[in-house]
Structures are given as structure tokens and as C-alpha cells.
Amino acid sequence: ATGETVDGMPANANKPAEYGKAAANPPVGQTVEPADESVAASTLSEANESAKTGEKAAAGVNAADGTLPRVRADGSGQAMTTNQGVPVADNQSSLKAGLRGPALLKDFILREKITHFDHERIPERIVHARGSAAHGYFECHEALTELTCASLFAEAGKRTPVFVRFSTVAGERGSKDTARDVRGFAVKFYTDEGNWDLVGNNIPVFFIQDAMKFPDLVHSVKPEPHHGMPQAASAHDTFWDFISLMPESIHTIMWVMSDRGIPRSYRMMQGFGVHTFRFVNAEGQARFVKFHWNPKQGTHSHVWEEAVKISGADPDYHRRDLWEAIEAGEHPEWELGVQVFDEEQAAQFSFDVLDATKLIPEELVPVRPIGRMVLNRNPDNFFAETEQVAFCTAHVVPGIDFSNDPLLAGRIHSYVDTQLSRLGGPNFHEIPINAPLAPLHNNQRDGMHRQAIHRGRVAYEPNSLAGGCPFQAGAAGYVPFPEPVSDVELRGKPEKFAEHYNQAALFYESQTEFEQRHIVDAFSFELSKVTVPGIRKRTVAMLRNVSEPLAAAVAANLGMEELPDPLPKAHEKAIKPELTRSKHLSLTARPGETGIRTRKVAVMVAPGVDGASVDSVAQALIAKGAVVRLVGPRIALIPTAGNGHVDADASFSNSPSPLFDAVAVPNGKSAIEALCKDGKALEFVRDQFRHGKPMMAIGDARRLFEEAGIPVDRKDKGLVLPDSAGSASNDAFIKALEQHRHPERETDPPAV
Ligand code: HDE
């Protein structure tokens, strides 16, 4: 039955049959073919093509080819059943004694439905609870057999499926995406010799040196336990209390207070394995290795006020950005690079390579590109895939081994452990998103929710009854690197771990002027939220060991009249660093290769706008791959100055300025008159200016900028003010957009 429709959308034709006597004979449920097939098939997959690009995900490169199709479920054209497969006659009312009578306990259908619902949440991750993920593949550039026997690096062009989850750390599952925080960057490689999880972050160093301190660190940053505040924020007393007592955290803190802590997109951040790992080749020779992911999209960030406003306008900002890019066929890509070095080299460094609070400057060990990763398919189901994926640092494959980094050692057992309580038992490897593509055989049996049906009577080894199978793989299996170990048991740290400030200073000195300014602002903001003056003081005392100007600027912003003495250092003799400035540490070092592709641009429209000027800008931007939205006072067809219309698909209320990378305001006298009187339009362009965005005003539109108080006469490459629309001005605007942001216009206090 198709039922009545409202503009092609079906009305509920069965509704009247729920009431009175008619309820005794429920009609067969209503089914309707979706009016537009692309709506039903909106998720890009091997079978469904993208509604926007008409392209399918490339076959043979996604994990779905292995373990996922078996469990993909689709109710299209099917009758509803219980979990036991019994058809459900009526899904509207519970079973009662009479239409007005009491509900009956024997209603197993209601009970099954509600019971399942009651249990449909699992504990969220203790850290990294909020995240978003995608499928894709890794492609090796060249055979690396000399370095490692890991099968994914065995030959040029070899592709290995991956599933990648990005996350914030401190916030809960439903928190906002644009909090100031470290971002998780976890990659599961489904290699043909088992799963390898490279569970990294977007920052190459970590807060602490030893796993022993992890629960303390996390307890300090999470909402304070007495009142449960603040959510997804480090700007509070307990965090800074801990940090200022733990000077080893200062290097990572510098990164988090920099623009790295507020990325523009998951697609525009680097990723790092953080710890030193080992590559081991087929001869058993090992070398140390650090992993780097470099985004083709470049590294870009928000400014703080923008991040704050986005968290209200669209808390799912990063999730949406990743999803939409992949749906549109704009598959994000990263290059995997490695820093490879040996024990002798490591011994020469002024820092210890087992200390996760230190990076290895690229000037000392260059990064060698070894492959690329492309994310080309969104998950089918958020819970089944993104929520249930279980990353474990213990998941390594032959050719990859650990170092003795004491932080890594703690992680190796922690991740498996957390999955046991999060996913309810030891069989989480059977959940389809976690199952390896490589076949698995062993004598592990039973446990909660076991899926495999093991055949035969033998579940032990050695055996003769099963011909000795499954037999041990010997040299073909995972053989740990035979690192010689002989020492006394003790708790303590190596000498070099005691130096905390050299690399924090290296990071600060390597930033551009505006990046340094943002770091000052971030410390000032965070510490202004701290209520205990002693904690602020102690943090400034710590900053004096990083940079005197930084400490002085933060102190001034906090109204501190006198600088506290620098925090005492843990080591007596100064350790000379190899370098005090690196050209690889500023975000500006990686502008990317994709230009303005996927950048979101608002074209502002109101009744009377010049249609030709709208078209000219919009077409020029779209041709370069930007995403254009026509933003007006309301979503509506807007009459243009001639007899035409443009379709405003976004409004100042539902899509405010911080959601866009740039704005263009077309010509049109009456449109500009109306916009000059619209406080929301004025706020929109003011925010664009304040946040350093490229802005274009064509002809009359210049008045809107003037009305908003924007200093239109200033020398500013991000302000494009042509008299009329045309290719020259479009090119200038696109050029301004290629620079992404124009921080040179930032002043304190802001000009508008
Ligand atoms: Fe984690 N971390 N971590 N971590 N971590 C978790 O595992 C832990 C550390 C990272 O998208 C948990 O499945 C300990 C460093 C990411 O699912 C937990 C220590 C780095 C993710 C855990 C660390 C990370 C996690 C919580 C110190 C960067 C999210 C849920 C010894 C190299 C993965 C879970 C995803 C998640 C423990 C330190 C990255 C509790 C004990 C350093 C990206 O097991």
C-alpha cells in the first residue's frame, strides 16, 4: 500500500487501524520504494555509488571485502521479525486485556524490544570516547624488505585495508568536536599476516614518561569528580595543578596550547606513532623507527574563538567534515613516513629515544616516505564499526616490534584490558570490524558471545588426535627481537629523562609569530579559568624555563605583578640540545597540495542580489573544488535583481560564520541595503574578519563591510574588494583562500 502522500512523502496509511475495533486485525505494514534511490544509497560503498560523484568505492581495497559482508543487514522489502525470526504482526501497541485494560506480562514481543533497548549502550572509552572513523587502504611505495619483514611493506604498490578512528581525548562520547585537546589517530591495518594497530596521536609527544602516571593524568583532566565539570576542557584547576607539578608534561603542553590543539579538520592533521618502535627484517636485524602521517590536505587549524563558537553551532563539526568529504569523493590522504635509526645513533642524542616526551628533530633523522593511506568509504553503522572497533597496541605483526619505552610497555596490556570491560569479554576479536582478514586458528575456546563453532575433539597442543594441528609456525611466526636484558629490578628513570625543557623551547622558538601569539593566548585563557592563584603561579614558574617572553606575556595577561622564580630543574648540569630551532614544527611548514578543495565558502545572498555576480563567484570556486553554500536571512528561493531566483540553502541562523572558511558578498543594491540592517549578516562578516578568513565584497557589498566596522582600507591580502564580478577578482579571492587564513590582521583587542 502506498498510502496518501504529501509532496511524494508517504503519509502513515495504517494509523487509523491502531484504534478501537480495527486494532484486532492489524493491516499488513506499509512499504514504499524510496522516491529517490540516491537517498537510500547515500553511503559510499562497493555496491552503492556516491550520490554526489556517481563513483563507487574502489573494490578490493576495503576491509568490507573480508569479514564485513557476512554481517551486513538490510531490511529493505522485508517484514519485521523478533530476534528469533518470528514475524511481528503489530509494532504499535502493547498486548493488553481490553483496549483500556492492563498490559500483560506475557507480551514477549514488547519485552524483547524494551529489554534490547535497555541494554543497547556499552561503556564509553575511558579516554578518546568521542571519535569518528572511516575505511580505506594503505599502499606501499617500495619494498622495504631490507628494513622489515612486515608483509604490508613487502612490495611496491601492495594495498592493505585499513580502518582509521580519529578522536578527542578528554570529552565524553557526546561532547563537542572542537575542544582544545590532543586528537587520537588510530589505524588498524588488516594485513595478510594479522592485524597491526598503530594507535597514535596528532601530537608527536606525550604528557608523561611512565605508564604509572596515566591514571593520574586522566583523572586530572576529566571533569572534576565532585561536580562533574568541565566537560571536554582542560581549563580547570585539577589539570593545571597536576601539570604544574609534572614538568615532564611541558613539551606536550606546548603542543596542546598551540594551534595543533584545535585542528580545522581531522583531514588536516599529522599523525604520529609517538613511541620509538622497531622494524625487524627477515634476518632478525632490528632498527629503531618512529612513524609519521603527513596529510596531503596540509596542516590547518581554527582560531580559538572560532572553535568555541563552532562547538555551539555544530558540535559534530569534525565528524561531519570527514563524512561529507568522503561522500563527495574527496578522499583524504596521508603519506606514511618513517625515521629509522640505530642504537648507536640513539645513544648520541642529548635526549633518550625511550622517553615519549621527546621527539627526534627531522634535522637529526629525516623522515622517509614509505607509503600512502587513502580513506575512501564511510562506515555503514556508527555503533557496529566506529564504537566497537578495538585498537590495541599489543596488536603487532612480524616485522614490527616494541622498544623499551616504559609508557609503551604500560599500553601493551592496557588496551586489551579495557576492551574486556568495554566489549564484554575475551571474544571481541570476533566482532566483524575487529576480525582479521588473515585466517586464525588456535585452541582458545568459549567465553561470552563466542561466534566461532570449533569442530573436532581437540583443543590442545601438542596433540596426535588432530595430527598436531594447528601447529606452531616457528620461524614463520612472530619472533620477538632478542634484546639482551640483564639488570637489577628497580623503580626509576634513566638520567636523560630528567631534562624537560629543551624541546619545549625548541617547539616554541620554531613557531611563527602568530602561532606564538596563539600559544600565549591559550595559556592565558586556560590559566584564567584556574581559581587557585598558586597553580597559576607554578605554571608561569614552569614557563620561565621554556621562554622568558612567553612567561612574561602570560603573567601580564593574568594580572600577575611579579614573575615567580623559575621552577627548580630536576637535573643539575645543563644539557645542550642539538638545535634550538627546527623548520618542521610550525603548522605553516605543511600547506598541503589540495589548494582550496573542500574549503567551505559562504556566498551571502538577500532579495535583490545580482544573480550574475553570484554565479560568477560560485562557478569559479566550484571549479576549484571548493564547497559553496548560498547563505541568506532564511532558507528560501531568493529573488535576484533581474527576474531570476537563487536558492539559499543555508541561513545565518543555521549556518553561522564559524562554519565557513571564507565569505563572498555579491553585488546588488537592495540586497546590500537589507543586509546592512540585518544584525546577523553584520555579525557574520565581523566574525569572518576576526577569524582571519578570506573575504570578498563585490561592488555595493563593500558597504556591508564598512557598516560592520571592517577596516576596508587596510593592506590585507585576505580582503578582496572589486568593483564588479569577474575572473580577475575571483582569481584574487581564490588566491587569498589558498592561504587559508590571514592572521596578520589579529590585534589585541580585536579591531571589530
Ligand atoms: Fe591510550 N588508551 N593510553 N594513548 N589511546 C586508550 O583504549 C592508555 C596513550 C590512544 O580510537 C584506551 O580502547 C594508557 C598514548 C588513542 O579507539 C585505554 C596509556 C597515545 C586511543 C588507553 C595511554 C595514546 C587510546 C581507552 C599510557 C598516543 C583511542 C579506550 C600508558 C601514542 C583508540 C581504548 C580508538 C585509547 C590507555 C597513552 C593514543 C584506556 C594506559 C601515549 C588514539 O586502553
Image (cartoon, rainbow, N blue to C red):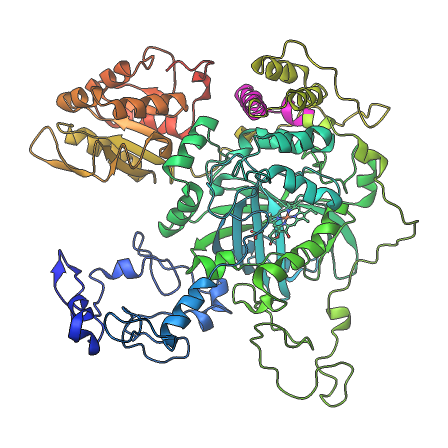
Quarter residue 568 falls in: top right
Quarter residue 672 falls in: top left
Name of the residue lying farthest toward the front: 101
Residue 510 in the magenta stretch? The answer is yes
Task: Return the x and y of residue 445 as percentages of the image width and height.
Answer: 66, 77
Task: Return the x and y of residue 694 as percentages of the image width and height.
Answer: 36, 25
Above or below — where is 180 with respect to 716?
A: below
Task: Return the x and y of residue 380 as percentages of the image width and height.
Answer: 41, 60
Quarter residue 80 falls in: bottom left
Above or below — where is 567 with respect to 167?
A: above
Residue, x 29% and y 17% (percent of image)? 708
Above or below — where is 508 with respect to 222?
A: above
Task: Return the x and y of residue 202 as percentages of the image width and height.
Answer: 58, 41
Above or below — where is 275 with respect to 527?
A: below
- Magenta stretch mostly in which secondary structure? helix
Q: Which residues are magenta?
A: 505-527
Residue, x 77% and y 85% (percent of image)? 463
Residue, x 71% and y 37% (percent of image)? 357
Name of the residue lying farthest toward the left: 643
Is residue 639 rendered to the left or right of residue 532?
Answer: left
Is residue 375 rendered to the left or right of residue 337?
Answer: left
Q: Nearer the viewer, residue 733 or 689?
A: 689
Name of the residue lying farthest toward the bottom: 465
